[in-house]
Image (spheres, coloured by chain):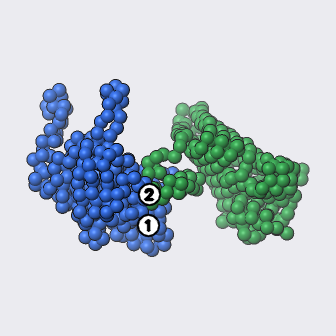
Chain colours: A blue, B green
Amino acid sequence: MLELKNVYFTVQESEENSGGLRNIIDGINFTFEDGKFYGITGPNGSGKTTLAKLIMGVNPVSQGAIIFNGQDISAWTITERAKAGIAYSFQQPARFKGITFRDLLTVATGIEDENKLLEILGRVGICPLSFLDKEVDARLSGGEIKKIELAITIAANPKLAIYDEPDTGIDLWTIGPMVSLLKKELAENHTTTIVVSHNRAFLEAADVVIIINSGKIVYSGNLEGALPLLDDLSVCTYRDSCEGDRDAGCYR
Amino acid sequence: MLDAIDKSLLKTVADLESLPKGAYNIRKNGKLLSRQVSANIHIESNAEGTGIVVTIKPGTKNESVHIPVILSQAGLYDVVYNSFIIGDDAEVTIVAGCGIHCGSSEPEGHAGIHDFHVGKRAKVTYVEKHYASGDGKGRRTLNPTTKVFLAEGARAEMELTQISGVDEANRLNEAVLGPDSLLLITERVLTDGEQTAVSTNNIVLKGAGSRANMISRSVMKGNSKQTFYATMDAQNKCFGHIECDAIIMDNGTNETMPSLKAGHPDAELTHEASIGKIASDQLTKLMSLGLTYDQAVNRIIQGFLK
């Protein structure tokens, strides 16, 4: 349903760093199949979020093509991609002044009817009335805004849902139900699901685990096969110069 | 009595489809058009004949008074002095507002100078909307002044909105807060074209336990300019906060000067101020929900000025 054909995202380095070109995403080829659950993981700065944003159109591809349900969407705007059925949960959701959760749900679904909105809230497992008229502003906690972000994405009934680190700021007890919710949406609505995460719970739920390192896909397959590679990648690159193991309580 | 233009202005500035229920005083082109008093709300012209005195009986509950002003006479600059005396323990909503319809090249303007004396434990909600319309090229000016005096335990919530069409506005808000009183001001101003708006706010936290929160939301479109001054002067153990946010669109400009003065060791004063374009993460989020760029901008501004 989604095909990445030799996709690059290239940026100009600053003068201090040679001023040359750097590929944040470095020639990725991959096909996401309809109705499957994908877990994308990899070290910090490896390009996971950048890849997810290329799919949504937040950043334009520098080279290559993104094919969605047979159409080349590489040059499409974010709006066009949203209308075609792609939804995105941001790692750091935007905060507004004067816009409520209800407003965002209405924008995402076109629904204003109170009972139907409450139905959606029931479906995403959010305590309804206390949340609906909350302003999506700086007063929300990190966990609350992530729940709202997730709920809006699900409510939009996308064909392809991308969640960028949905568990950031979420308490440990909520992660299990969150995984179940995404799996239920997939089962009931056939939503192709891509989750960018470091959390094992999401990777265990995934049909396919993808590991990205230095802008390339270095592994795709089941979690079992990914584990040895993940162990290797998690080795701290500062180990030689840092004595954190002993002194700073580094838990790597 | 009310023509189509009057009705449209009243609808915009006071949400009135027809004459309101309860007490009201409607002023048109510098003269009294219609007035009604109620058992608890008395309205009379002041001694100088330059405005009205609205007296709300102590203990009055859940009543409202509408005092809109409409202007459609070319060349008129209408100045009115209104006083509001709100009795102890009363709870009242005052809906003011000025609508100007300018159909010629002559300027038109209004200066509403309002003072509020809010009694002990009384609660007043004051809603004021300013709006100008019409095809005329005449300059439309609105220069309101509000002076608020809060007695012990009194509470005033003021919503001051300038919607559109006003070429020049120079607003002055002053307040003196007694012990344990609370003042909440929310000001929303949208300017466009070559319009200018200045808002000056001087809030004196005089009584122990007084609290004030001033929120200003400004949007500058076109080449318009807005200037915002706010001073919280804490003279006792009190709490004061100023929050001023300005969104620049097109070539608009803004100057914002929040100022905090603590004249007492237990004063707590804070302010936050921001000026800038619409944050790109907000636009991206709304576009990812299917809005176009322009729709996203409108939705954000609409919420910001809500």
Residue that appears at 70% across and 43% down: B194
x, y (%) of residue B112? 78, 50
Quarter the N terminus of chain B occupies: bottom right
Nearest to the observer: residue B24 or residue A156: A156
Residue B190 visible: yes
Q: Amino acid at mark 2?
A: Thr
Residue that appears at 12% across and 46% down: A229
x, y (%) of residue A135? 48, 56
Is label 1 on the same chain as label 2? yes
Q: Chain of mark 1?
A: A
Where B53 falls versus A123 (above or below)?
A: above
| Mark 1, other Cα within 10 Å: few <14 / some 14–19 / many ≥20 | some
- Provide the secondary structure element on which disc 1 rests: helix
Nearest to the observer: residue A8 or residue B148: A8
Q: Chain of mark 2?
A: A
Quarter the C terminus of chain B occupies: bottom right
Residue carrying label 1? A109
Nearest to the observer: residue B150 or residue B152: B150
Residue that appears at 75% across and 61% down: B9
- Mark closer to the chain start, 1 or 2: 2
* Residue A79, numbered label: 2
Where A241 falls versus A65 (above or below)?
A: above
